[in-house]
Image: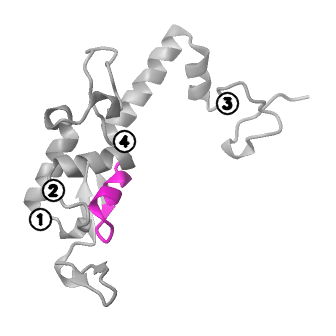
Amino acid sequence: MALKTKDNRRKFDADNMQHIVRLFNTNIDGTKKVAYSITKIRGIGRRIGHAITTQAKVDTNKFAGELNQEEINRLVDVINNPLEYGIPNYMLNNQKDYETGEDQHLVGIKLDGLHRMLIERGKKHGEVRKCRLAMGLKVRGQHTNANGRRKKVFGKKK
């Protein structure tokens, strides 16, 4: 239960809350509000995070550590099936999938696997952009000799 401070702001009750909530193989900070804390899951941004919390009928002013198991299960269900809960397809991150043709929203490890699969398919087709992504080089026409030294990629040698 959240406590009210003197200036009427909410403060979390450290005794009755979890400080770390585990969702989709990600540690979520329980001391932050729900809509903000689920953005730590890979594939969920601020906008779809707010849409997920409202469609799951979870109070957006609640802290993530205050959620009970029923609310967590509702959040997980909305994240797994966003179209069934009325979230529009333009908010999804995998629209018209290459293999199935369906609109999906991928999070966590599934999103990493999709990105890896796209790069492998592009390399097989000989797409220059995907080949450069796989090698760790710049993709959009930038010079590689003097700039971008942090990625340990070597430019041309004299």
Q: Is residue 144 above or below residue 151?
A: above
Mark 2 and mark 1 in contact (Cβ < 8 Å)? yes
Which of label 2 and label 3 is nearer to you? Answer: 2
Mark 1 and mark 4 in contact (Cβ < 8 Å)? no
- Where disc 3 sits, the SS reads loop
* Residue assigned mark 1: 68
Q: Earlier in the sequence, mark 2 or mark 3?
A: 2
Quadrant showing the C terminus: top right
In this rendering, would 120 be left or right of 87?
A: right
- Where disc 1 sits, the SS reads loop
Q: Residue 11 in the image: x percent, y percent?
A: 29, 80
* Residue assigned mark 3: 138
Residue shown at the point (31%, 80%) measured from the top left:
9
Which of label 4 and label 3 is nearer to you? Answer: 4
Q: Quick one: 97 or 58, which is closer to the camera? A: 58
Residue shown at the point (32%, 19%) measured from the top left:
97
Mark 4 and mark 2 in contact (Cβ < 8 Å)? no
Q: Give the distance between the C-alpha atoms of the residues marked 4 and 1, in whole angstroms.
A: 23 Å
Q: Residue 12 in the image: x percent, y percent?
A: 26, 79
Q: Give the distance between the C-alpha atoms of the residues marked 2 and 3, in whole angstroms.
A: 40 Å
Q: Give the distance between the C-alpha atoms of the residues marked 1 and 2, in whole angstroms.
A: 6 Å
Q: Give the distance between the C-alpha atoms of the residues marked 1 and 3, in whole angstroms.
A: 45 Å
Q: Residues within 10 Å of mark 2 (few under 14, many from 20)?
A: some
Q: Residue 37 in the image: x percent, y percent?
A: 33, 59
* Residue assigned mark 4: 43
10 part of magenta stretch:
no
* Residue assigned mark 2: 72
Q: Earlier in the sequence, mark 2 or mark 4?
A: 4
